[in-house]
Image: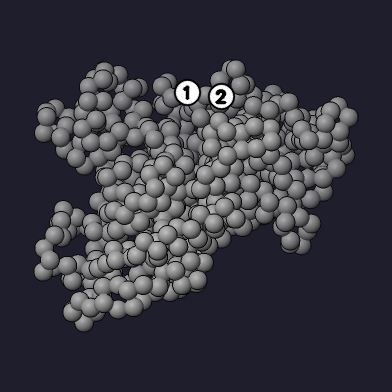
Amino acid sequence: MPSNYPPENISPDQLNSILTQIKDYQTNHGSLLKVIGSETPHSVHLQPVSASVFPTVFPRRLFNEAVDELQLIYNELYCKLAEDVEWLHAVTGPLRRTEPLVDALWSVYEDVQRRRQDEGSQYIEQRVHAGVFRSDYMLHVEGDSADSDDDDDDDDEEVNENWTQNLCLKQVEFNSYSCAGGCHADKVADMHRFLARWGLYDFALESNEGREEQVVNTKIPLSTLPKNSSINGIASVLASAHKIYGSKPHSPKATHTAVLMIVQPNNFNIADERPIEYALWNWVDDDDPIATYRIEWQLVLDHTKLTPTGELLFFPPESGDSTTASPVEISVVYHRAGYEPREYSEVVNGKQIRTRLELSRAIKCPSVLGHITTIKKVQQVLTVPGTLGRWLTKEKADKIRGTFVEIRSLDDVMSSTKNLEEEEELAENYILKPASLEGGGHNIYGTNIPAFLKTLSPDSIPDQSAYILMQKIRSPLNVYGMLMSSSRGVVADEVVSELGVFGGCVWERKESSSDRARCQVIENRVVGWSFKTKEVNVDEMSVVKGYGCFDTPFLVD
């Protein structure tokens, strides 16, 4: 690793040239966010997505491990989890007492099963499901070197030369529902490759080659900046599901079949959704381009209808009066909404919305059971020794088990934490996370953990079961980056990065007594990646919430 990267000696003119190119590239390629509250019927204010000025160093072998080895195993695991109703209910069912979202999802599942039984074979059950997954990792320092400051100048050369040797990947979380960031990551990766190709990353660096520090002229080769095709990759999963459903409608009332993307209202992050829609409209394969429509979550009931045999008919709002317009038959429901408890309130009729979609013949991406697999409690229980063998071979289980950190159930911790020393150990070495909600913005860190635990009743098992304690990942020190955001400007500081790998799966549920055989995987592939970087003293990573920046890994050996 170069000892002076990003370059400290870059001139103001060089830096301004790079920043200008970044702003222009983002403006011309839609790497943007809507400014909340700025939209009018005829205009909207936009701001660039926060991005790194320079790509951030990352070990090539670990990037390849995540992309080439780990993701396909994780894809297989979560497909099988989504068809293991008994196990999922045993793990997440107890959360229904305290977690409205978990209760809503299970209520939808139970209502769908009840209606299928009550109405017999009226609705044709869809056994094919799809999933767009994202597994997030951080670098972890193994052994005693995790606590080393590496401040001794005599050791700097050795540290820089061998810094990747004691590193491994540890999983932050696995996302199986409404996975975001793929479109932004795709565009930022292309941007950094453009800047490297243009020559804006050609500069003088200090090098430790030959054990003697010297200044050399160098550049970032394109081969060290991996290509990313997350937009087309995610679209390809939906295209595969659409092809399985068929381009010819089953309902005589429908004109054609189409993908339906369910989205949140007033969405400032449309640049992470629309490109997938556009990619499908421009899809060129054996069939015609794939029609794709969007509908806001709260409008689903007004613009959809189930036929007597379960086809989901969609009446696009743009087509006018739904009583006279010809409907579209939906082949695939792609969820980018429905992940917040408030979306299932009685005011919104969220349970009814989700039940209609789930009951339909359309292929769901994902199903309600696939949604339940993203709950953090699932991630915690998967770390329990012996659990993975229910679905995976020993070789595959051992491979992904190496990415686990210790995750503890809070009710177990509360029963064993007796004194101040144990509380301090929790504050120093763990992060407190909700067992149901996606972690970003909901986590509790450091000394706030003991203070929060004191607010919980020691006798309230439901309250305690709503949280998990995850061991902190010890990221390597002395990794530096330069980040640019609309709120903070340009910041050069020590940084931490997170690699997310997107996976895509299509599978069919089979009737079987074997836990491994209930899921027949039709397609399993890696469809892209995301790379985000934050300052080392910032806890959260979410880019759209203002914490981190989209980035590209500068792969080093």
Farthest-out residue, bottom: 210
Whether residue 139 is visible to the viewer of this picture, yes or no, is: no
Quadrant that contains the N terminus: bottom left
What amino acid is labelled 1 in the image? Pro
What is the quadrant of residue 208 in the picture?
bottom left
What amino acid is labelled 2 in the image? Tyr
x, y percent for residue 304: 74, 31
Judge from the rendering whether residue 231 lies leftward or rightward of residue 74; answer left or right.
right
Mark 1 residue element: helix
Looking at the rendered structure, which numbered label has been put on residue 344?
2
Q: Which residue is mark 1?
A: 100
Seen from the viewer's position, the closer of residues 535 and 461 is 535
* Residue drawn 44% across the image and 53% down it: 51
Whether residue 157 is visible to the viewer of this picture, yes or no, is: yes
Seen from the viewer's position, the closer of residues 329 and 440 is 440
Q: Classify mark 2: residues with Cα within 10 Å, few (<14), some (14-19) or many (20+).
A: many
Numbered circles on residues, count? 2
Mark 2 residue element: helix
* Residue drawn 48% across the image and 28% down it: 102
Whether tag 1 and tag 2 are in contact, CB under 8 A, the answer is yes
Image position of 387 with respect to 221: above or below? above
